[in-house]
Amino acid sequence: MLKLFKNKKRITVTKDMSVSYLLRQDREIRAILEDAGMHCVGCPSAMDETIEMACLIHGADPAALMERIQIVLDRKYDAEHAAD
């Protein structure tokens, strides 16, 4: 398993984070974004959008989307640090 969080702090999702940054954190995030109607996550112009901008464009609730992404990242962090 790739140790995403090894020697790193827990990531807190904010509305100012870029879509591309979040996509690099975990593969499951792509499905969350697509489920929110953001089927253009692979588009080069979408990669620099923040979560807030993407939600505004696609009519999604940024708080709900950030919460779903946070759950994924927290689960991954907890799994990688369970043995510590």
Image (cartoon, rainbow, N blue to C red):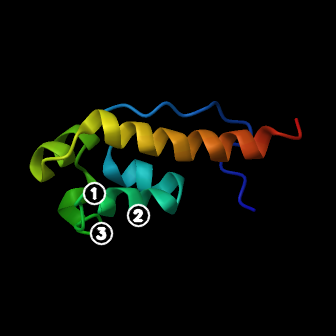
**Of marks 3 and 2, the one in the foreground:** 2
Mark 3 near mark 2, Cβ–Cβ under 8 Å? no
Q: Amino acid at mark 2?
A: Ala
Picture coordinates of residue 27 (x, y %)?
A: 51, 63
User: How busy is the neighbourhood of tag 1: few (under 14 within 10 Å), some, or many (20 plus)?
Assistant: some
Residue 22 in view here: yes
Say which quadrant the C terminus sits in: top right
Q: Residue at x 73, y 37 (%)?
A: 7
11 shown above or below 57: above
- Per the image, the residue denoted by label 3 is 42
* Residue 68 pos. (x, y %): 43, 44
- The part of the image, by quadrant, that contains residue 52 is top left
Q: Earlier in the sequence, mark 3 or mark 2?
A: 2
Mark 1 → mark 3, Cα distance in angstroms: 7 Å
Q: Are marks 1 and 2 in contact (CB under 8 Å)?
A: no
| Callout 1 secondary element | helix
Circle nearer the N terminus (1, 2): 2
Instruction: Residue at the far right: name it.
Output: 83
Q: Earlier in the sequence, mark 1 or mark 3?
A: 3
Report the side of 23 relative to 65 (left or right): right
Instruction: Report whether 30 appears left or right of 56.
Output: right
For the residue carrying disc 3, how many other residues have a C-alpha within 10 Å: few (<14), some (14-19), or many (20+)?
A: few
Q: Is residue 32 above or below residue 10?
A: below
| Residue at 37% over, 31% down | 14
Amino acid type for the residue under numbered disc 1:
Met
Q: Which residue is labeled 1 in the image?
A: 47
The residue tagged 2 is 31
